[in-house]
Image (tube, rainbow, N blue to C red):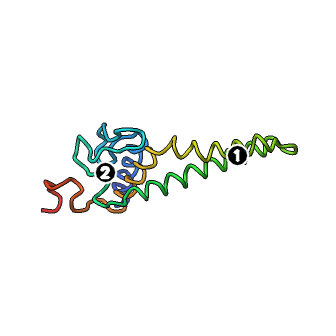
Amino acid sequence: MQPANSHHLVAAHARLVRALRMRCPGCGGRGVIRGWFTLAPQCPTCGLHLDRGEPDHFVGGYLVNLAIAETVAAVLWATLFIWQWPDPNWDLLQWLAAALMIALPLAIYPFTRLLFLAADMIFQPKRPGDYGDGDPTFK
């Protein structure tokens, strides 16, 4: 017999996988990315509002982006440093660190923005207005 929360774990996993595939975390529909730095206002398939009705919802996406990007940059830098030990090329390491800290947040932005939305939906599954004025969830 499966634990009572196994359904919630499967749903959470599905939301995260959908976000990594750059699809709507709610339904898996396509078309939620308008440009590399722009999400659609809502999912064209299910109507989920991608900002969840909060004007500063994007700040969480930025936080997740910086945390993941800078951690990956630090691990890559440390790996190269250890690989070059005992005589590391400091010029290379300096420029690599700068390049990684600029490029990685830009490269992974849409993924992390949708990952934050998926995480938000895991912890707050249904909120009034998530699906617009016609939201049947809270009627």
User: Which quadrant of the figure contains the N terminus?
Assistant: bottom left
Label 1: how many residues lie within 10 Å, few (<14), some (14-19) or many (20+)?
A: some
- Give the side of residue 95 with respect to residue 87, left or right: left
- Residue 18 rendering spot, x and y as whole percentages: 37, 43
- Residue 65 rendering spot, x and y as whole percentages: 50, 51
Q: Residue at x 37, y 44 (%)?
A: 38
**What type is the residue that disc 1 sits on?**
Trp
- Residue 3 rendering spot, x and y as whole percentages: 38, 59
**What type is the residue that disc 2 sits on?**
Leu
Of residues 41 and 135, the one nearer the viewer is: 41
Earlier-in-chain disc, 2 versus 1? 2
Q: Residue at x 54, y 53 (%)?
A: 66
- Whole-angstrom CA distance, mark 2 to mark 1, is 34 Å
Of residues 138 and 2, the one nearer the viewer is: 138
- Residue 47 rendering spot, x and y as whole percentages: 22, 47
Are the two marked residues, 2 and 1, in contact with CB atoms closer than 8 angstroms? Answer: no
Of residues 1 and 100, the one nearer the viewer is: 100
Q: Residue at x 71, y 42 (%)?
A: 95
Q: Which residue matches tag 2?
A: 50
Q: Which residue matches tag 1?
A: 77
User: Which quadrant of the figure contains the C terminus?
Assistant: bottom left
In the rendered view, would you say 21 is above or below 122?
Answer: above
Q: Residue at x 39, y 40 (%)?
A: 22
Label 1: which secondary element: helix
- Give the side of residue 78 with respect to residue 4, left or right: right
Answer with the quarter of the image where residue 17 lies: top left
- Numbered circle sitting on residue 114: none
Label 2: how many residues lie within 10 Å, few (<14), some (14-19) or many (20+)?
A: many
Label 2: which secondary element: loop
